[in-house]
Each structure stands twice: as C-alpha cells, then as structure tokens.
Amino acid sequence: MAKATLYNNVIDAHIVDQLAPGKFQVFVDRQYIHEVTSPQAFGSLKKDGVTEIPFPQLNTATVDHIVPTDEDGRRRNPLIASLMEKTLEENCRMYGIEFFGKESGKQGIVHIIGPEIGLTHPGTVIVCGDSHTSTHGAFGNIAYGIGTTQVEQVLRAQSLAHKLLKVRRIDVDGTIPQGVEPKDIAINAIRQVGVRNGAGYAHEFGGSALTNLTMEQRMTICNMGVEGNAAATYFNPDQITFDYLKGRERVPKDSAFDRAIKHWISIASGSDAQYDEIVKLDAGRLSPTVTWGTNPGQAVFIDEALPQVDSLPEGDRNSAVKAYRYMKFGAGEYMNGKEIDMVFLGSCTNGRITDLINAAAVLKGYQIHPKLKGKVLVVPGSQQVRREAEYLGLDKIFQEAGAEWREAGCSMCLGMNTDRAQGDVLIASTSNRNYEGRQGDVARTVLMSPSMAAYAAINGKIGDVRNHSFNK
Amino acid sequence: MIKQDKIIRIVEGRAMPFTEDDVDTDVIIPSRYLATITWDDVGKGLLWSRKHSQDGKPLENSVLNNPSYAGAKLLLAGNNFGCGSSREHAPQAIKCHFDGIVAISYAGIFDGNCYAIGLPAVKVTPENMQVLLRETQGNPNTAFRLDLEQKAISYDGKSVPIDINEINRQGFLTGTWDERDTLVGNLPKTREVAARSPYVVGY
C-alpha cells in the first residue's frame, strides 16, 4: 500500500474509527449539497424525526443542476424544478445549513463556488452527492462523489465509511505544446491509464509539465479524474494554491493564514512517498484532443484517424462498436472536419473564468457559423464567474460573435433543465461526458477544450485551433 | 451487532442478460427521472433508452422487454457497470425491479451506492459470465441462486464462484450494510476528530 502520500496523510488525520480491516469511518470537513441528490436524504431525516444535525456549519448548499439559465428556460422549466429548488432552500433553513440561492450573488455550480468562496482547502476530506467532487482535489485534499444515502449519513454523522484506496502517481513531464489545454491532458491521462482502471485508486497528478498550472487548470484535470473511474484525484498543494486561497472570503487571515500554510505543506506527499503505481505521460507529444465515442476514454488527437476496432484492447472492443454505431462514425475517419449542430461552453470542467477567457480569445472579432445561430451556449459556472467575465468584456465578445450569454448553472452538461439538445445533433462540448443521450435523447457529444469548442463555433465544424488566426 | 431483519444471504430468481460494457448511470436512468424529490417513480426510468425507441415506443427486440425474462430478479451486466454520475437513482431504479446484480466489474461510486442501499452487486469472471449467459439465454426459466455465504451462483445442479469485497459480504450477511447507526453511534469520537481538525477550528 502507498505510504506518506497526501492521500495517506489526509485520511490518517480524519480517522474516527476502524470499521473492518481496510475500512475506516472518516470525518468529513465539508459536504457540498445541491438540489438533485439531496431531497431524499433530508426526507429520510424528517421521516425519522431528526430535527438537528451535528455539524450544520460544515455543510454548504447551492442550486445548479436544474436551474434555468435564461428567461425562456424560466418560463418553460417544469414545476418540479422550482419545487426542487424550494425544497433545498427549506431543508437548509430547517437544519441551519448555509444556502447560496440565486439571490445570493454567489450561486453557481457547486464545484465552482466552493473554491471561489474559499471553502475548499488543502488537507481536508470533502464530499458531495456528485461525481465531479473530484474537482476540489486540485487544492490538495481528498474529495469524492457519493450517493444520496451517503449524503444522509454525512448529514447525520459528519462522517462516512471509507475503504482504503491505492495511490497511483501520474507524472506529466515535458513541455505542454501550444494549443494543448488541461482538458487535453485530462483526456489523454484517461486514455493512458484506461477508462476503467481508476477504480479503487486515488490519482495524484504531478510532474514538470504541471508545475506552473493555475488552480483553475488543475481543477479541470481533477474534475475529469472521475471519468477514468478514479475514486479521488488530487494535486499536492504549493505556493500557487496558497496564492489562490489568500484573501478569499472563507480563508483565514493574517497569522491564522500563516498557520494554515504550515499545515497545508505538512500534509503534502513527502519525498519518501511510496505509490502503488506510477504512470508517465509525455506532455510534449500531445495535440488538441477530441472524443469520438460514448465514453471519455474514446478519444483521438485532432489529426489522428479513428481507431480500427481490432486495434483496441480486447476489453474495449464491444464498447467501441457500440460507440461507432451511436455516434455514426467509422474507423479510419477523422474528427477534423465533422459538421456540428451545437456548441456548449461551460460546466464544472470548463466553466471558470480562464476557460471563458480562452474561448473569447478565439471568438474575438469573429462570427459564429450562421447555421449555429441560437445554438452556441456560453454558460458561466457561477454568478461570480459571470460578473468577472462581464467586467472583462467577454460577454460582449460572445454576444457580438452571435453566441448566447447565459446565467450560471450546470445547463447542457447533463441537460436537466430546458438547455437540452433536440433531435440527432452533433455537439462540440467543453463538458465532461459524451454519454449516449446525456445532452439530448439522441444527441451526440464530442468533448474538447474551450478554445477548440470556440473554434468549432466559428467554422461550424470540428477543426484544429492551432490553425486559428487570433485577433488581438 | 447482527441485524436480523436486514440480513441478505440469498437472491433467487431468473436472470436478465444485459451485457453491454461501460453502461453509465445516464443510460441506467436518464436525467429527466432525476427531477423528483422522492424515490417513488425512479423505477420507471430504468434503462429507458434500451427499452424504448426514439419516439418512446417499446422496442420489441430488446431483451429487457422480452416476456420470457419478465420478473427476473438477477441482472447480469458487463464490464464497468454503473460508470459516470454518482446518482443513487441508478441503483434505486434497479432495486425497484431486481434483487441483485452480477457483473464483470463495477465503477466505484455505483458499487458503493449499491452497498449503501442493500443491493448485492457481485462479480464473476468474463468466462463465467459467458457460462451464465449461455444458461439464461438457452433457457430463460433457469432458476439461479446467488448465495453470499457460499460465494457462488448455482443453477440446475451446477455453480460458478462469485467475487465480492469481503467487507461488503460480511455487511450483507450480518445485516449491517445500513451504516447509519454505526456512524451516528460514533458521534462522540467524531466530535473529537472535529475538535482537532485544523479546518474546523480555524488553524
């Protein structure tokens, strides 16, 4: 088993009790809550007559999954959506949990607002009823998604049963080529490790290529960790982490901040860290990457032909056949040049300010392809991201290009509100899942980075953003 | 600390052969069935796209609609079953129709959710999955018996071994898979850990 890694250090410090060999009750420092995976948990508390929870202050809630992102969506959203929002707000009031509703100015995708407010710290255990909780691992903590029954357990006991994980170090070395973004690194890490092989592992990212990544870039990589089945994904905290946290609303100030930094440094993987497995990825050989199939591991470089089924590992062939059938693509074809019908820029993967800056840089001075009018959605990940983007004038760049500038939420990433593709359309999407039916009942999703998606919006087809002429 | 009323030792019934690999929880239950504040109707969304055509009509050639398998209690599945979203609606929807899952492998959050709601999810090797498939496809009326104590699935006088995490197996056999009481029972210890958590006390 791994030793002296951040994973070991954090879990050791959170053990409440041993429940079985290799299974521990661990304390949860922060639970994030949203409207879709929590109502049944609160319902169970109420059914049992539980009127108080032990640590309300360690739980934080917002609405993101089903909230409408424009006026039209508000009009057309079914009643159940507002009922779900209202239910969460009432549950939070009843149990004394802080709730960031739409009037708060701080609402947004739960994995974007937590770091933004400064509630996500290194060295903590963080959970949420959402698989992309892995995002928070960018700060150097153990963060993972749970089901609703476990949400209820955390409400009742601020702790969870945790089976010990193995730790896989993923070293990304070399120089990241121009045009390659964290999204590309994340997808290629999944290709390298295997889309199923994260099961039972925490993934620790590091290596010379990632040393200078910003926190937002690290969040994109950790966000996608769960797409390779990793139980948790993290970076070790460093000066970039501390600089990001400093001055944020819920981060301690002055001498407490200095003490916090000492603690955060102490929980990082040591020079004596031992890993169960080490994987190397050469950043220098990467190109902008797009998915062709129906899981995020089914991906190619933009200039790479789609694989022959027989060339894939035996265990991946059935899914490849299934994916080709659904996506209506064939082996030997290229993604470069495929006509698209919609573009989605947003999500907890790529809905932060850096992502919008990158997309806007591509769109500046350009128009989206005429056939995509009304079909290019730009959805900031939070109300704060939206304000920041407007302060920088990005909203004007998007709108002048002909794109829709929306309000914060998960939107078309999972298509639970009215932001959902109709019919058999191909979508260039910066989100995290290209699953069958996810963005529309028969919609087909191609995952890519924000700049690649913006480039596709201009051309009406998938292309190589390295060929783009940027306007200053 | 055995909880008699929650012990799960045996699942008996016919077996539904649904063997796609990498079935994500969006396929197990589409997001529109997540627009609810109860579990009441989640069963209706189970594998919707595998049971219906694009215009919502039942697919006649879907094994899931084959009357020979109606009422099957075991769901046979492929590799990496339940990947993707953490939505517990997925195992809850399965539990509305089935009492146990047999797959080649599972995704982690899904596996944890199955345990948390008392739905046995066991593994067999790819070879043994082929054996089980041949059996139920050859005769949909084959009665299978998943025995967690014996760690085997038996049918027609034959049996294949199953793999299940030993801690989970004990949890089912002792009825302690519902961990709420255990976790709450440790609240005094949890408060001690909280009191020394730098995050909680402000460093």
Image: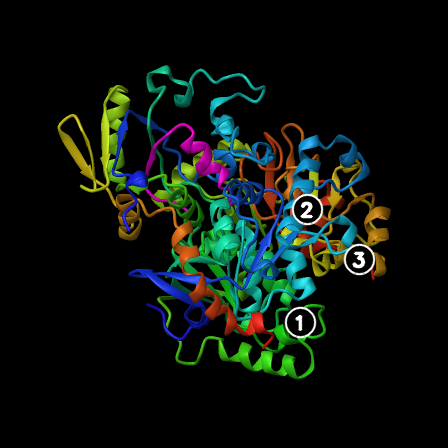
Q: Chain of mark 3?
A: A
Instruction: Give residue B52's mark.
Output: none
Where is mark 1, residue-wise? Answer: A251
Where is mark 3, residue-wise? Answer: A389
Q: Residues within 10 Å of mark 1 (few under 14, many from 20)?
A: some
**N-term mark: 3 or 2:** 2
Q: Are marks 3 and 2 in contact (CB under 8 Å)?
A: no
Q: Amino acid at mark 1?
A: Val
Query: Would you say B176 lies left or right of A328 here?
Result: left
Q: Which quarter of the image is occupied by the N terminus of chain A? A: bottom left
Where is mark 2, residue-wise? Answer: A89
Instruction: Classify mark 1: helix, strand or loop.
Output: loop
Query: Would you say B7 lies left or right of B154 here?
Result: right
The location of residue A101, given as percent across then percent down, is: 73, 50
**N-term mark: 2 or 1:** 2
Q: Which region is colored magenta? A: B84-107
Q: Residue at x 38, y 46 (%)?
A: B178
The location of residue A218, given as percent across then percent down, is: 59, 64
The location of residue B42, given as percent across then percent down, is: 51, 31
Residue B177 forms part of the magenta stretch: no
Residues marked 1 and 3, same chain: yes
The location of residue A203, given as percent across then percent down, is: 45, 62
Q: CA distance from mark 2 to mark 1?
A: 25 Å
Q: CA distance from mark 1 to mark 3?
A: 23 Å
